[in-house]
Amino acid sequence: MKTDHTNVEPDSETCLPVNAAIKDAPANDPNDPRVMAAVRHFRIVVRSIQAHSAWVERQCGLSAAQLWALWEVARAPGMNVSEIARRLSIKPATASNLLDKVENKGLLERARSGPDQRVVKLFVTDAGNELLRTAPLPAQGALLDGLTRMAEDELEGLRGGLEALVEILRIKDEGSALSPMPPGKS
């Protein structure tokens, strides 16, 4: 029995044959110096973030994301995991796992409150406060720090350009928008 594939849409994991991609021919030559410069700049950004994270971990024993979470709790004692997730732009489950590691190092504690004891609030311990006094900056990480230092028009141009790039990508993991960058190797 022959299967009719005429109305089958390729899924995001399907590789298209070369001739199928002609209709989506690139607007820019891959050898265009601007394209190559953008590739180099992406590599520099990613490696800078990884290097910063590795440096933070060598300095204080926490990943950059863990340090940022601890810093956020110190700024607003009593916040919950959902608020940390929002501030770090990560999933609540990822935030919970990240906070478990910080808590296991004795730098953070969770306290239940409210009549039903289901509300869990976060607090920095004395050891956590001591670490924060000597921790490297920027606590929120190199990428966020760099983005906040850009001129408004540059930031808007970057946002628009990255949005267009994400839209063009054939295979994309949009869930990765809520995942921290992996630390680099030193």
Image (cartoon, rainbow, N blue to C red):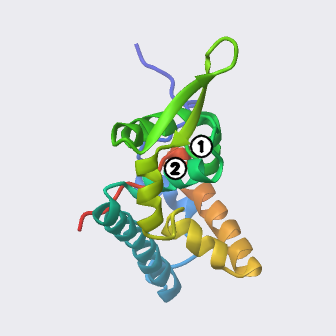
- Image position of 115 with respect to 98: above or below: above
Q: Nearer the viewer, residue 182 or 32?
A: 182
Where's residue 159, x and y in %? 68, 67
Q: Residue furthest front?
A: 126
Query: What kind of residue is marked 2?
Result: Ala
Q: Is residue 90 left or right of residue 59?
A: right
Instruction: Name the residue at 52% across, 49% down.
Output: 69
Query: What kind of residue is marked 1?
Result: Ile
Q: Nearer the viewer, residue 144 or 134?
A: 134
- Image position of 18 with respect to 14: above or below: below
The secondary structure type at the circle numbered 1 is helix
Which of the 4 quarters of the picture holds residue 23? Answer: bottom right
Q: Residues within 10 Å of mark 2 (few under 14, many from 20)?
A: many
The secondary structure type at the circle numbered 2 is helix
Q: Residues within 10 Å of mark 1 (few under 14, many from 20)?
A: many
- Image position of 27 with respect to 130: above or below: below
Where's residue 7, x and y in %? 59, 30
Instruction: Name the residue at 69% across, 19% down.
Output: 114
Q: Quadrant of the N terminus?
A: top left
Residue 69: image tag: 2
Where's residue 123, x and y in %? 55, 40
Q: Are marks 2 and 1 in contact (CB under 8 Å)?
A: yes
Marks 2 and 1, Cα distance to the nearest angstrom?
A: 7 Å
Residue for badge 1? 84
Asked if residue 88 shows in the view, the reply is no
Asked if residue 32 shows in the view, the reply is yes
